[in-house]
Structure formats: structure tokens, C-alpha cells
Amino acid sequence: MILQERIKNVPIILGSKSPRRKELLSSMDLAFTVEIRETDESFDERLDPISAVKFIAETKLGAFDDNGLYDKLIICADTVVVDHMGTVIGKPKDENEAIDVISGLSGKEHKVYTAVAISYQGKRISFVEETIVWFNELSDEEIKYYVMKYKPMDKAASYGIQEWIGRVGIERIVGSYENVIGLPTARLQKELKKMFK
């Protein structure tokens, strides 16, 4: 019996307001509800990016630690982007910063890390998936066109791979495409199968 059949009667909560994560989880043929619990996403600056993103996902999951949710499957996630110098790139504060960020990524590689934290009946799993992304050299006009038309202010590293810039500006990726969007669906399926064997 496939996972989707095995857990069809398990109530699932996605603890994320990201519309992209919602779309990805839906595409896995899993029925779920979305519940947002605000958490402090600050972390120790001395943590490396992998430890930091895992810490944030686990903190988000910790916000669901109450007895009424024991029989519910909770899924939380967080994504960070790290440039070729090892610097974590957050969401831009305005269009000018978004243009600067994409200009810095142009012609170079960067890494995307998504951490997923899951709990069900006292069992917890958390993992981090890595994808390496290479951008082609983008012209100033292309970058400005993308930022002004698509307004990527809600996206880490100022871009969405599923949008125009991903279609025309990405040379190649190594790893999960869905991971760059915000939820590594194949790895999530694998981890859930372990949890519900």
C-alpha cells in the first residue's frame, strides 16, 4: 500500500504560510489543512547555514507542541539561500536590494537549503536537503525586468525558480528542483514512508 493510502485518515497540518509549499504538498496527493503559529525565527549567528535552517524548522515545529495535536501529522519547513561566498541571503527589503542580490548571483552558483521538521504521535524527524543552482550571466535589463514585473520581495534570494527568471536564467541545478521552490517533495515522501512503515 502506498504512503498516500496508508495515511489518508491521518489529519495533516502544514505549519507554513507559503503558497508554494501549499501547492507542492497538494501535488503529493496529501490532504491537509494550513495552520500558522508565529515563531521567533532568530538564531545564533555562529551557526552554519545548515544548522541554522534546521534550527528554524524545528522551532516552527515546536510551536505545535500541545496535547491536542498528538494524533496529527505536523509538517514545518524553512528555506535559506547561500551565495558562492557562503553568505546567507534573506528576503529583499525593496526592489533595489532585489536587483543587487540577483546581480550578485548572476553567472555564479549558489546553494539552497530547505529544512523540514515533522512530528506524529511523539515521533520527530528533521532533515535538510541541498540543491546547487547555477545562474547564467544576466543582463541588467533582464534583472530589472524580472524584479519590476514579478516583485519577488517575499522570496529568499529575491527570485522564484518557478517564475520567468527560472525559465530563462538558470543554466543548471544539481539536486531537487522542488527544494528550491521550498519543499523537497521526493525526500519528504521518503521520510514519511519511514515514519509510517
Image (tube, rainbow, N blue to C red):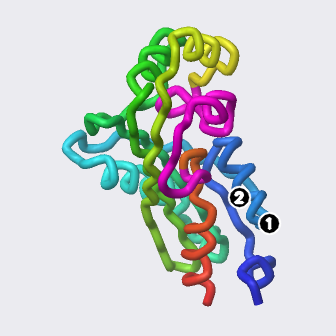
Asked whether the residues under the numbered discs 2 and 1 touch, taking CB atoms below 8 Å apart as contact, a structural biologist would say no
> Mark 2 packing: few (<14 Cα in 10 Å), some, or many (20+)?
some
Q: Position of residue 117 (x, y in %)?
A: 49, 63
> Mark 1 packing: few (<14 Cα in 10 Å), some, or many (20+)?
few
- Type of amino acid under label 2: Leu
- Going 55% across and 57% down the picture, which residue do you hit? 176
Residue 97 sits inside the magenta stretch: no
Whether residue 145 sits left or right of residue 50 in the image: it is: right
Q: Position of residue 17 (x, y in %)?
A: 65, 42
Residue matched to label 2: 25
Q: Position of residue 129 (x, y in %)?
A: 46, 59
Whether residue 135 sits left or right of residue 15 in the image: it is: left
Residue matched to label 1: 29
Distance Cα–Cα, label 2 vs label 1? 7 Å
Which quadrant holds the N terminus? bottom right
Query: Where does the magenta region start and end?
Result: 154-179
- Going 61% across and 52% down the picture, which residue do you hit? 178
- Going 34% across and 53% down the picture, which residue do you hit? 50
Foreground of the two, 126 or 37: 126
Secondary structure of the residue carrying tag 1 is loop
Quarter of the figure with residue 84:
top left
- Type of amino acid under label 1: Asp
Which quadrant holds the C terminus? bottom right
**Picture layout, residue 181 above or below residue 165:** below
